Image (cartoon, rainbow, N blue to C red):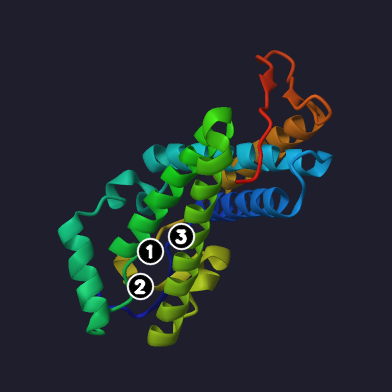
Amino acid sequence: MGLPSGKVLVWDLPIRLFHWGFAGSFSLSLVLGTFYHPEGIIFKYHMISGIMAVVFLGMRLALGFVGSRHNRWLHYFVSPVGLLRYLAATLRGRPSGKEVHNPATVCVAWLMYLSLVGLIWTGFNPDLGEVWHKRFSNAFTVLVIAHLSGLLLHTVRHRDGIALAMISGNKIGHPDDALTHSNRFVGWLLLLSSVIIATLLMVYFDADSSRLEIPGLPSLDFPEIQKG
């Protein structure tokens, strides 16, 4: 494998769209769920944005099987020993910072995905919603803070604006890690699909009755959520 020589394309358009769609939908759900009263109309739309986060997660699951090589699930498994070694090397200042994936990032990503599953599960279970929904929300928020802190540490230590990689798709790395194309067709297809799904959710959600009735699909009743 060649030595790091500059920025290469490692994130194609589909994974970048997933990243910002997932982050945006969760952030909107968090804001609506935190700052609005549960009995208000606006609060109920935090459920819709939460469903959109699940939609984006579904897209990510698909990309793990059919996406570009850096997005495949093969690269998203790390052993506890590998994680401990990486963290120990980080404390000693040894990691090169040129990995496409590092063990800490992989673990945080998995914990975020599992936390979202917990959020949806508790959100639709009135017996658990009051306490556990808030706990999963707090856990997800802590993971986001850990993710952003890691980006800041990487930027300061390696003088690499890695946060921009999810905008441009490029980061400092080995030439052998470079993707040959950005998969724009798949990316625009995912964007169009997410816009259509979001539109259907908004149009067919009755906030007064907390019911989602999309033609051709089973109706979905949203339970009343109280803030724990």
Q: Is residue 136 left or right of residue 225?
A: left
Residue 174, percent across and down? 31, 71
Label 2, on which residue?
A: 173
Location of residue 80 by image quarter: bottom left
Q: Are marks 2 and 1 in contact (CB under 8 Å)?
A: yes
Which is nearer the eye, 227 or 75?
227
Q: N-terminal of the two: label 2 or label 1? A: 2
Q: N-terminal of the two: label 2 or label 3? A: 3
Mark 1 closeness class: few <14, some 14–19, many ≥20 residues within 10 Å = some
Residue 125, percent across and down? 55, 28
Task: Identify residue type, mark 1.
Answer: Ala
Label 1, on which residue?
A: 178
The kind of secondary structure element at disc 3 is: helix
Q: Is residue 210 left or right of residue 190?
A: right
Task: Identify residue type, mark 2.
Answer: Gly
From what the image shows, is residue 73 above or below residue 164?
A: above
